[in-house]
Image (spheres, rainbow, N blue to C red):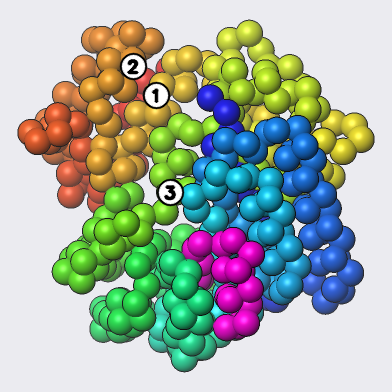
Amino acid sequence: MPVQALYVHVPFCHAKCLYCDFDSRPCRDASAYDAYAENTVARIRRLADAGILGACATAYIGGGTPTVLGDRLVRIVSAIRDAAPHLVELTCEANPESLTGDMARALRQAGATRLSVGVQSFVDEELRALGRLHDARRALDALSCGIGAGLAVSVDLMCGTPGQTHESWRRSLRCAIESGAGHVSVYPLTIEEGTPFWARVERGELAEPDGDLQAELMEEARTTLRAAGLEPYEVASYARAGCACRHNIAYWTGVSYLGIGRSAASMLDRATYDELAGPLRLPAAADTARRVRFVQVHDAFIGSDGCADIYREELDAREAIAEDLMLGMRMTRGIGKDLLARACRVIGEHAVRTAVDEAVSRRLARWDVDTGRLVPTHDGWLLGNELYGLFWDLAR
């Protein structure tokens, strides 16, 4: 299967948020932006010359904060459009403080179709506690800019943050709905090692997020967003009809995707990996590998002189099908009988049926009588790690 999705990483931001452990850094030297954008465009053109992106259907530019690049981001979007003529979706991540109406219109004209805006909260006190640079009014203005430019707009919200209450969470949900955004993603705050929040927790200055409160807020988001016409299609994502993120779905359905830029992740099936190993200067995979995942470690670009520095993980046939089952259960639509039948052939019918029966008996999953698919229940959504673990354990 050829590469069907492209991810481009932009490792820059105006300031590092207190909870963030992504590969990003503030940068006050614009020449670094210039060099990174030029290298990215050159890299995309090399991929195009090699015919690698000819079947690519979705692209996603993430970070960091891509919109800090200004007009350089527009050039990257144009390069992707030229390199991947069959794209149906091209998303740019954005933060409110660096998104303007002019930029949104320029991105749309260059070929972007979606904006994913990192709002996190519409309550000023909560935004300050997270170390965000924007306020609620700026967030609403940014969403309006995106929608006004004709882009599909997604809002990211975070629950369980310092000082958040049920009432303030309802306010954020209302603002997201009333903004006109067609997509909302909801994430619980996690304390990641090495972040300022981690250090505060270690010093006793900040409490760990309350898991019970986060579960309550996630449930409230599910009820509120569904009542407003945004249906869940993935564990953290809600969308109006026709507004689901196709790139997100590619990640959860085993589609081969290629990442470029520092810390960008790629996942290729074995046939595609073997086909691209030469043009991308990748090391040969083991005979047992059926799926290869790799992450670019440094700024050096794959396909330049010499081999890129990458971290690589190989999955054998059993691990690959177990991963497909696990990721499939992240989706509201669950997993179909064809995937289960393939799993039975690779892993063994007894082991697969035992895992399915346990998921059903524990009320983490159920059979949908209309579609014949195995789908997560409400409990399976809330207790996702338990549900996913049942299927990932089939890898061993």
User: Considering only order in the chain, which callout, 1 or 3, is on the residue closer to the N terminus?
Assistant: 3
Describe the element under mark 3 as helix, strand or loop: helix
Residue 364 drawn at (x, y percent)? 19, 39
Residues rendered magenta in the picture: 100-119
Q: Quadrant of the rendered structure where residue 126 is? A: bottom left
Q: Is residue 250 above or below residue 124?
A: above
Give me the residue at 35% from left, 59% from top: 243
Q: Which one is in front in this view, the residue at disc 2 or the one at disc 3?
A: 3
Q: Which mark is residue 343?
A: 2
Give me the residue at 79% from left, 72% from top: 27
Describe the element under mark 2 as helix, strand or loop: helix
Disc 3 vs disc 1: Cβ atoms closer than 8 Å?
A: no
User: What amino acid is found at the position of numbered circle 1 in the picture?
Assistant: Ala
Disc 2 vs disc 1: Cβ atoms closer than 8 Å?
A: yes
Image-based side of 88 in relation to 200, left or right: left
Query: Crowding near pointer 3: few (<14 within 10 Å), some, many (20+)?
Result: some
Q: Quadrant of the rendered structure where residue 295 is? A: top right
User: What amino acid is found at the position of numbered circle 3 in the picture?
Assistant: Arg
Q: Is residue 138 above or below residue 16?
A: below
Residue that numbered label 3 is attached to = 246
Q: Which mark is residue 322?
A: 1
Q: Which one is in front in this view, the residue at disc 3 or the one at disc 1?
A: 3
Query: Crowding near pointer 1: few (<14 within 10 Å), some, many (20+)?
Result: many
Q: Which mark is residue 143?
A: none
Q: Furthest-right residue in view?
A: 305
Residue 122 drawn at (x, y percent)? 41, 83
Front-lying residue, 225 or 309: 225
